[in-house]
Image (cartoon, grey):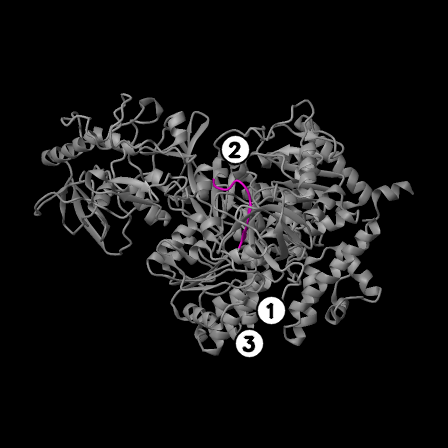
Amino acid sequence: MALVPDLDYGTPASQAGEQVTLTVDGRAVTVPAGTSIMRAGMEAGVEIPKLCATDMLDAFGSCRVCLVEIEGRAGTPASCTTPVAAGMVVHTKTERLDRIRRGVMELYVSDHPSGWDEQRGTGASEFDRMARTVGLTQNRYGTDGRNHVAPGDGSLNIDYIARDESNPYFTYDPSQCIVCSRCVRACEEVQGTFALTVEGRGFDSRIAAGMSDSFLYSECVSCGACVQACPTDALREKTVLEKGMPERAVVTTCGYCGVGCSFRVEMKGDEVVRMVPSKDGKANHGHSCVKGRFAWGYTTHKDRILNPMVRDRITDPWREVSWDEAFAHIAGEFRRIQHQYGRSAIGGITSSRCTNEETYLVQKLVRQGFGNNNVDTCARVCHSPTGYGLKTTFGTSAGTQDFDSVEQTDVMIVIGANPTDAHPVFASRMKKRLREGARLIVIDPRRTELVRSAHIAADYHLPLRPGTNVAMLTALGHVIVEEGLYDEAFIRERCDWDAFQDWAEFVMQPENSPEAVAGATGVPAELVRGAARLYATGGNGAIYYGLGVTEHSQGSTAVMAIANLAMATGNIGKPGVGVNPLRGQNNVQGSCDMGSFPHELPGYRHISDPGVRGIYEKVWGVRLDEEPGLRINNMLDAAVEDTFKGLYVQGEDILQSDPDTHHVAAGLAAMECVVVHDLFLNETANYAHVFLPGSTFLEKDGTFINAERRINMVRKVVEPKAGYADWETTQLLARAMGFDWTYTHPSQIMDEIAATTPTFAGVSYDLLEREGSVQWPCNEKAPLGTPVMHVDGFVRGKGRFIRTEYVATDERTGPRFPLLLTTGRILSQYNVGAQTRRTDNVVWHGEDRLEIHPHDAEQRGVRDGDWVRLQSRAGATTLRALVTERVAPGVVYTTFHHPDTQANVVTTDFSDWATNCPEYKVTAVQVSPSNGPSDWQEEYNEQARASRRIAGRLEAAE
Amino acid sequence: MSHDEDVAAGKRKLVYMANQIARFFASMPREEQVEGVARHINDFWEPRMRRHFFEIVEAGGEGLSPLVMEAASHIRRPPPPEPLPAAAQAQ
């Protein structure tokens, strides 16, 4: 397959309904009113030359290459900025136009050498192609002008600016730049960071990052939008410069966060040259972030383990074995353990990093093969309260909207989410809508970037104390009811009216007023009242939330409180509104949909329902256990009690990511056969007896489901390095345990899912190939999927209001632990960092830092950059301080991307009352100056180093 | 920690969890409270946890909130532990 770039229509599509017919070079074409002549030409199959125009950006009209002639009009207007009109007759190729275009291009080349190395992927830029297209053959002005030109003979021009190689992934070569400002506009319009600018005037004009900083030290977030936008070689991926231009492309889905961006993986031979966001991607529409766009180097990192390994004791070095030996060992051990300790003494953990098909197989292995329901997934520690809360109130465990819905939102509430770091591509779309005038309420202990950044300012920031979400949300409800701001017609028609009245009575209790809760939340009542009025009366209101809502002892209650607010204000069931959980992992929605929880089969159907069990019993040919199985934390509890002994963990690092590391370690150490199936020897593998090498998202076919319920295709780009895609590995393990699984392609697994799960009944790979992607429910009633849910009625029938009484967490500050620690993520790193730490993204974030307010820092004699000891009731660790006002006094914050920090040594084992989702977001701590790593960290590192030894191999230097 | 201490710690955790659940349902209308607690535990607690739960209840329910105690009669008894294949063979 040849490299076919995404078509560029030159200007964005017009959303107008009215259609206009015109003629371009003799071809009649009908387009929406407001379309540019350039775009209409492309629709008609006539490509008008252009340099400063691209359909990701608004028309600019600076390059003067796209000129056309229009019958009856004087002159040669730019086709990018001239809208179509009915009956217009346009000519794009005339002698006069050719002459002008050649003249313009000649001026360009006089000041900008074309290409900088034919061998290294140039001569392939849009600029070079345009020079050929317009028939440029001469340069009468020479190449020795003093501006911009790198002479290439070793001498330097007076104005020459050296290449900026500071960004690890792309190079900026000012001498190649034609100052079309596409990069500047991409940074503004698409990404919304405003890091780039044109400095100087006329011939002195240069593109600069920040205040003439290097790209790395500027505000640039390395999203790649500028590199994509650049029509020359001025901004170019380093991999292209090293390996040359790609030759073919495969469209697939990013393996990082829950936004689920579509990417073109561009290849040369069998090697990935670059990943470029796909414009057809319905989640990202051609945009990306530094992780998806650039941080794929881990897929070929030397740390990847490519052979199965076994050891008898976790203190032994690993022994490399054949796949067959590994499977035989696991099957033998698991059967022995069940024989000795009982059927329920083993279990499995599915991965939100793996495909739906792989997840489905792991839960099938547990239910069919192990004969119990001891299966859980990492959603336990992030969004399980979303599932519980939304199912209780609305009837289904998922967000209500698609991402495009934000374009019609008038008021956004962002609570417990930091989308510019954790969901950057969607954050860019939020910012775009905010710049268009949407209003914003941020409820977060930290002053996140959305609160105030370039051309964005929240109307309200409610900086509440960690752990008081429910009090805050209920107080918002109080104001809505007290001031009569609820949507009575909507509630009467769509919701349970009695339940509403009960809720209204509850929120009106005096202790739920903003004034009464101010003591707990620390937020002045007037701010809360203002925010409530804005949300209830500001037009389409949408609530976006993240783990700052769910990871609390009242996580499920907070989700229900959010659902109450949306129902009370009628903000459900149409575009622009809704309850939108921002999912963390690429496939956390899918892993939940696929029956990864111990109490439910695929499609959120409880295991105690004999009808549902019957469906699977028929297909799988076994009797299913009707009792709910063990959750991750129950497995660890049972392990220390000696009743749980064997675990198959696919693609999750529970030791690093789950709370109370000491308890996790004790649980794992008590097991007799821990099987880790992963790319790397992660922290959990320190306690494993068998290691099965995993495959990356580039090495398999399958599907991921993103935060908007969108089922996206994952396509195999390269062969699995270790020999098997993860679904094949699970299948071989099932076969070793005596089950006759015979899938030859993941599409057959999806067919089984569709045949057994009503919300997926219409899904097939054929449909996904045809449509690109669909959002579940996808069945007879919605053959092409469901962008917005609950349109004519709630899935459960009538929407249900629930009382949400605030219960303070038992994790309290006191004299010994006076500060509250909350945790989060940063843009360049991803969760436990297993992937991103193995890429150049470490240049942005090489270690976890403790954010602390200057006041708290001064009291403790802590300066910026000092080592500090962070101690809680559960444990202690050390890391370096970052003194900043982003956190309020009394609150400290850190990320958990680095295993050296082991932030979860500090977090407690308090958890959500309904789902046991851990309370990561609130830990009472003390901070004190320190000399360096704690004893625990040093012991841990020594244990980790020892447990990673592989027999017959020299120890790898980290 | 010895094995017995681990089991005791596990039981303390169960008491805490049951009370947490009761604390949520306590704000519901009276008729939904008992049923809510029982249903939640029936839906989400695996047999081992319910077995420990009833051991606690039968030992007097130390630490359990009155609402949990009231709900106990609506909570499904876990199936008896299956005979271990290994133990059966040994006999």
The three-letter code of the residue at mark 1 reads: Tyr
Q: Earlier in the sequence, mark 2 or mark 3?
A: 2
Q: Residues within 10 Å of mark 2 (few under 14, many from 20)?
A: some
Across and down, in percent, residue A259 comes to: 47, 48
What chain does badge 2 belong to?
Answer: A
Q: Return the residue found at the far right.
A: B91
User: Which residue shows up at 35% across the image and 44% down it?
Assistant: A210
Toward which corner of the image does residue A61 lie, by quadrant?
top left
- Relative to A573, say whether A66 is above or below: above
Q: Earlier in the sequence, mark 2 or mark 1?
A: 2
Q: Which residue is mark 3?
A: A498
Q: Secondary structure at mark 3?
A: helix
The three-letter code of the residue at mark 2 reads: Thr
- Relative to A73, say whether A817 is above or below: below
- Report the front residue among A804 and A368: A804
User: What separation in Å lies between label 1 and label 3 (alpha carbons)?
Assistant: 22 Å
Q: Which residue is mark 2?
A: A299
